[in-house]
Image (cartoon, rainbow, N blue to C red):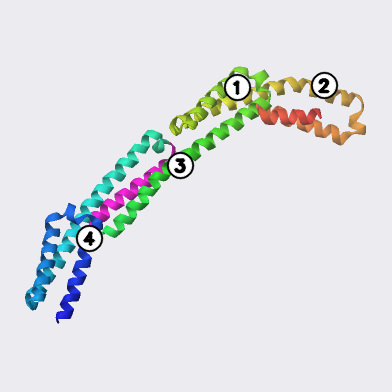
Amino acid sequence: YEEDLKQQLADLTARIDESGKWKTGELSAETYKKAVADQDQARIQINEFLFKDAQEAIDHGQSSIEEAIAMAREIGLAVRNREAESNLLATEEKGTYIYLPEQYQAIQGLISDATSQVDSGEFDQAEATLDKAEKQTIELDANMRKLAEQRLAEVDAAVREAADAGAEKHAVDALADARTVLAEGQSQAAKGVWKEALAAAGKALPKAVEAARQAYRAQTESLTPTAQKEIQNARDAGAAQYAAAVLNKALDALDQSQKAFQSSDFKTALAKVTEAQD
């Protein structure tokens, strides 16, 4: 019986030591002290062969330390939960709720789950849930960076397309505006201000698209009369008899160009009129 009591006392001591990771001595000090006092009392009673009293002290100490742990974990997790909420809210200034709403709301859900788990005493589950929420909150910044870089790359590609389409000649103002706003976005991205970088990208993209649209339209309007004239010349030269397939292909391309132009698909219109001319 004495050896059994000594083992129980050793287990109690180990549990008291383990409880330190939950800050029981700080967050549930009074109950923690009771457990330590019971531990000390049981040790004395075992040495004095007061085994029944020692058993009562050990039992009381085990109950006290479990109560202290539960109290400390509940308090500690409540603090972590509030910190998780605060950290998530802080990311709103970087635009996470606007640009990454699904990820933001998923973290909100985790924090809510952790709250419910703490309330029901599921402390291990709550810790795991908060670990996940905290990790995903940290990842939000990296995801904002990736999104900003992706959007700016899309705008850069659109600006290049507009320039290649002849916007420097046919849509000077629109192209200049797109380049100016793109530069602002790139500057913000270089400083890690993802919200402003994304806002700039959102403004620059339609400007670049409009510059390309104007350029494609202008070039189509410029090339169409030439293509029509060349096709007519081919007809006059007898293409309908000697190169019917080529002539029909040109006529079909010209027809597709005109239909695309009417539907404001100027990029396709230019491609087709170029095909017809070739």
Q: Is residue 50 left or right of residue 190?
A: left
Looking at the rendered structure, the kind of residue marked 4 is Ser
Cα–Cα span, label 1 and label 4: 66 Å
CA separation in Å, label 1 and label 3: 31 Å
**Measuring 26% from the left and 53% from the top, which residue is drawn there?**
116
Residue occupied by mark 2:
229
Give x and y (percent) for residue 73.
Answer: 23, 55
Label 2: which secondary element: helix
Nearer to me, 187 or 23: 23
Q: Is residue 262 left or right of residue 11?
A: right
Residue identifier under label 4: 19
Q: CA distance from mark 3 to mark 4?
A: 36 Å
Magenta region: which residues?
99-120
Q: Main secondary structure of the magenta part?
A: helix
Q: Position of residue 269 (x, y in %)?
A: 70, 29
Graded by Cα atoms within 10 Å as few (under 14), some (14 to 19) or many (20 or more), the crowding at tag 2 reads: few
Q: Is residue 186 magenta?
A: no
Above or below, comparing residue 161 to residue 56 in the picture: above
Looking at marks 2 and 4 on the same chain, the residue that comes earlier in the sequence is marked by 4
Q: In what element is the residue under mark 1?
A: helix
Q: Which mark is residue 175?
A: 1
* Residue type at numbered disc 1: Leu
Q: Are marks 2 and 4 in contact (CB under 8 Å)?
A: no
Residue 251 is situated, as x and y percent measured from the top left of the image, at: 80, 30
Residue 233's tag is: none
